[in-house]
Image: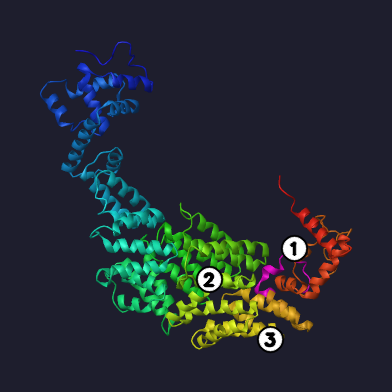
Amino acid sequence: MATVNQPGLNHMDPSPHAAELMARQLKGENAAVRELLLALSVGFMLPGPLPADLQRRIDGGEVESLHALVARAEQAGLLLDGTVIGPARHALLTVAPTAKVHALQRELVTCYVEDGQPLGDFARELARGGLADLRVAAELEHAADKALEHDPGLAYRLYDEALLAGADETATAARRAQAAAADGDLDAATRIIDTLLVSADPPDIRRGVDVAAAVWAQRGMLARSADAYSWLGAARLGPSAALAVVSLVGCGNRAGADALFSADAPPASPTLLAAAMAGTGKGILQSLSGDPEQALPILIHASDMLNSSGSALPLPDTPAAIAATMALHSGEPQLAEAVCKAATAAGQGGNAAKPRLFLLQAWSAMQLDRVDDARLAMNEASKANHWPLVPRDQFLRAALDVGLARRTGDIAELVMAWERARDAMLHTSVDLYSLLPWGELVITAARLRETRRISHYVDEANRLLSRLGDPPLWGVPFHWAAVQAALLSESPAELAPHAGALARAARTSHLAAVLASAGKAWVSVLAGSFQPADVEAAARALNRMGMPWEGARLAGHAAARTEERKDMVRLLSCARDLHPQSAQGGNGSTPGEPRAGATDSGNGLHPDGSGLSEREKEVARLVLEGKTYREIGETIYISPRTAEHHIARMRRRLGAENRSDLLARLRLALAAENPPQE
């Protein structure tokens, strides 16, 4: 009998090349060793069972015993502890005909099935290796179903592998799309759903429409989500009725929402997920009622239940995001931040929902005048998953950039952020849950004299609120934004309807009452006929409603317009209480009055050699932006007289002969502070 060793081949050579060469040369009387090694390479294990044909030949004495075959394979260095070494395994599987390999794999699957053993990860290996077998496909599909709600990324990969093994593409389409959407891959989800929805009698159609609605919403087109549910119809809507409410109310169709969903109806099933969905629909409808304060607790309970369920179901909007938006509309940014943090930690809504939750955290921080926290949350949103921000989230991010630039007084950055926001507007539309960012852009458009570019969207927002009966919870912040824009534009005609809306809402909304009072205070300040005590009360009320920057701005503007020094000091003190960042970098002087020489060194220069104190550098930047004494004072909460004093002292220190010379020297001084990088 021939031996395994072939002429010229050293079986003691441990190199991978030698093992591969030896495996390829197994032929003739060594064919039985080859058959054994191929079976083990495919996945059979010692001591058996082995492929039926090989086992028959061993049992019939046609080849050596299994013990002898194993010994010869081990002697040749091709088998170690019952496992074919890597290079030999690769060579055997490469040389063997594909049909032969697949036949052995199917026989192995039969062994697993007859023994009642799951294939586990072996099924994935078989599918990726090209084996088409419905039993393998079924096991992969079952594994994907189990992972769908909790690990959609894994589920999507398993469904793809099931397709490779022969699963029905149409039957799995809705679940595959759900997995892709929950993982954040909107393009893949859209392609799958489009194919499903145009097929004749599509299976799992309700799930498919849920995914389509979620994708449309994330693309910033909530009306399309509503259209999808209307197309599905009440008869097929079932448990998705609550999700239809999110879309229909969001685009202003209250009647359609009432026709599909009853807030008093029990959940479709006693599960956490069903209860969370029912609570979401009920909370949204409650927010439109005469008692909207009950809506927020309902939405928070729904968010808590969805967190506990661990579901990553893609939704038009998550209960956490809606609850946070309601909290922001109610003047409770701290609560909004807490809800978003809890939902993010629980993975509510999967990877697709993470960016929005982070951005709402950022909005809460911005409203609370915590600029650094806002920027940190925005950065987290950008890296929350593998995909770029969806249009809805990109729009929210652009509005945040605008809001932060406006609050920090950086005109150059505000102009650039506005241009980015204008582009983001083109990729989204107005809906109920986006009124906060639209309000921010309304104010900025007035500030930059760009109102004409946003007037169409303002009209759409007003029509949306009108269709819903102008609900105070949703309408008050937008009307407040419109009031501020009208004040900036000095347009009484544009101010009147929004001021009237705030006054009407003040009967049932505490926030509306505070904003209406603040609006009156602003008008009195701009008219130059105000009482400092009234302005301070309005400013501090804004602070209590989670608007410290707005309150400080009101007090600062009033301080710049008062003639009485004691009133100016009082209002500046109020502004700095509410917006302490404005005092950072100051010289510790009493508000409104600089302390001469406080930062001078022996030669009259600041220790960094620029000749300017930190406060003077701040004033210098504003001077170079072209601001007047009054505008400088309003920006950093000092009096116009103090701003003038700073500028006069800078002129003396820098030896400037006139204003042009001063501007040139200020540029050089600030350039010395921030030299160009190599």
Q: Is residue 564 magenta?
A: no
Report the magenta residues as a range.
576-590
Residue type, label 1: Arg
Q: Is 47 positioned to the left or the right of 648 in the image?
A: left
Per the rendering, the mark at residue 621 is: 1
Residue 81 in view, yes or no: no
Mark 1–mark 2 Cα distance, whole angstroms, equals 29 Å
Mark 1–mark 3 Cα distance, whole angstroms, equals 32 Å
Q: Is 604 positioned to the left or the right of 315 in the image?
A: right
Residue at figure coordinates x 38%, y 53% from the top left: 188
What residue is pinned by disc 2?
A: 438
Mark 3–mark 2 Cα distance, whole angstroms, equals 32 Å
Near mark 1 (Cα within 10 A), the count class, few <14, some 14-19 or many ≥20, is: some
Marked residue nearer the N-terminal end (3 or 2):
2
Per the rendering, the mark at residue 533 is: 3
The location of residue 563, given as percent across then percent down, is 78, 83
Residue 290 in view, yes or no: yes
Residue type, label 2: Trp
